[in-house]
Image (cartoon, helix red, strand yellow):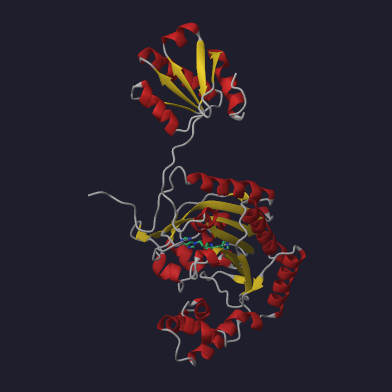
Amino acid sequence: MKIQSIRGTHDILPGSVELWQQVEATAHALFELYGFAEIRTPILEETELFARSIGTATDIVQKEMYTFSDSKEKQISLRPEGTAPVIRSYIENGLYREGMVHKLFYIGPMFRRERPQKGRYRQFHQIGAEVLGTDHPAADAELILMLRRFLRELQFHDYRLLINSVGCFECRPTYVQWLRGALQKFQTLCPDCRRRLEANPLRVFDCKNPACQELLHRVTPLLERLCPACIAHFDSFRRHLDQAKVDYQVAPQLVRGLDYYVRTTFEMVSDRLGPTQNALLGGGRYDGLSEAIGGPPTKGCGFALGLERFILLLSNQEELGASYVPPRSTVFLAYLDDRAFQECLRLAEELRAEGLSVTLDFEARSLKSQLRLADRTRALFTVVVGDLEIDSGQFKIKRMADGMECTVTRAQLASYMKEQGSATASQPAC
Ligand code: HAM
């Protein structure tokens, strides 16, 4: 029986991977301008890390992690997100001792056992960034400015920014207690929300059930019950956004699916992703997360963008494409016999050393089928090698775009193709 990929995972083939590379390269270049350095953490972590950070009452920890026993006493999980591992690493490697703000970014796969659908996968990729060591609202706003620029550089404009504050350890517990009481009165809450009321009433705001949404609009949101310090923080965050002329909507219902957030939360959503999975990225502040996993008091904020969702939007596709397009080579070397094949192997290495991409056929097929292969690799030039070329040292180069031919010496091959590779087809080849 044919073995297939795991449900909710996908291959990224040549032809699609180039867009991923472009997005990743843009992130690398731009994030560095904002002072971020890349961090790579393991895909496997102790389950306890996610339980203590994301929260035991969240969907992620309760039902979505891939968890298994490593040894009798240790449970480990495939990481469902990148923030907790970054903080774990920050603590473990003593970065906090350097007494400065650390800005770290990451790109990599995450795993959640969710029901797969458009834009929702079991292995997906995030580009994330974390700022550690400051609670200044300008740091939260700077993340938004960096994201705005990132999306603009990739010519993506079709999104809305939603912001909110979910309070702090001072004001939130009182509100949560009040909310539980207020919601208990509503008999029409769905069974899921009834369960959430016990463990984590704020999560009720995340319910997609229209009847529950309707009820929630009648409840005073946390944003209107913040303590003075949280109000000041949120106002300052907004002022920074206003000064930079950032468009945003305050969304008092925006609670995020992870429990570590305090104060700022935000999402960038795109209606083109569909009504339920519309978040392109999400983030916020998580002062207190370091302490929750045994580290020193550390303030921090960050975000993560879902790469699959972004790729769907950028490529205007409904599903992630899996059509294969072979890579383009600069030159295809064709040969007439074995002597010429040996010469082509040597020549290929010399041309590659000059920075040209070279393809040749290993199967000693007819010249006709070698040239068909040259077409398939969309080679810019073809060189046919036989006794004549080897003995005379003169090689005929054919420019595939217009069929123009030119004869040069072996030593001139690389420089000729470099020059002509950037010229247009209408220009003379010789
Ligand atoms: P999150 O909202 O859980 O936040 O995930 C961030 C983004 O990852 C989402 O907006 C979405 O684009 C993408 N994503 C999440 N789950 C899936 C899935 N199953 N399939 C495809 N894409 C998905 C976090 O993960 C936080 N660590 C963000 C953060 C960083 N907060 C502070 N720093």
Q: Position of residue 323 (x, y in %)?
A: 41, 46
In the rendered view, would you say 414 is above or below 149? above
Q: Position of residue 184 (x, y in %)?
A: 48, 90
Q: Image quadrant for the C terminus?
A: top right
Q: Residue furthest left?
A: 1
Nearer to me, 76 or 353:
353
Nearer to me, 72 or 34:
34
Identify the residue shown where x is 70% and y is 77%.
231
Q: Is residue 136 visible?
A: no
Identify the residue shown where x is 74% and y is 66%.
240
In the rendered view, would you say 210 is above or below 276? below
Q: Is residue 82 visible?
A: yes
Nearer to me, 284 or 314:
314
Identify the residue shown where x is 50% and y is 9%.
393
Rendering quarter of residue 166:
bottom right
Rendering quarter of residue 374:
top left
Identify the residue shown where x is 53% and y is 71%.
259
Q: Residue furthest top?
A: 391
Looking at the image, residue 344 sits to the left or right of residue 284; the answer is left
In the rendered view, would you say 410 is above or below 242? above
Looking at the image, residue 423 sits to the left or right of residue 213; the answer is right
Rendering quarter of residue 117:
bottom left
Total of numbered circles in the picture? 0
Looking at the image, residue 355 sits to the left or right of residue 4; the answer is right
Q: Position of residue 197 (x, y in %)?
A: 47, 83
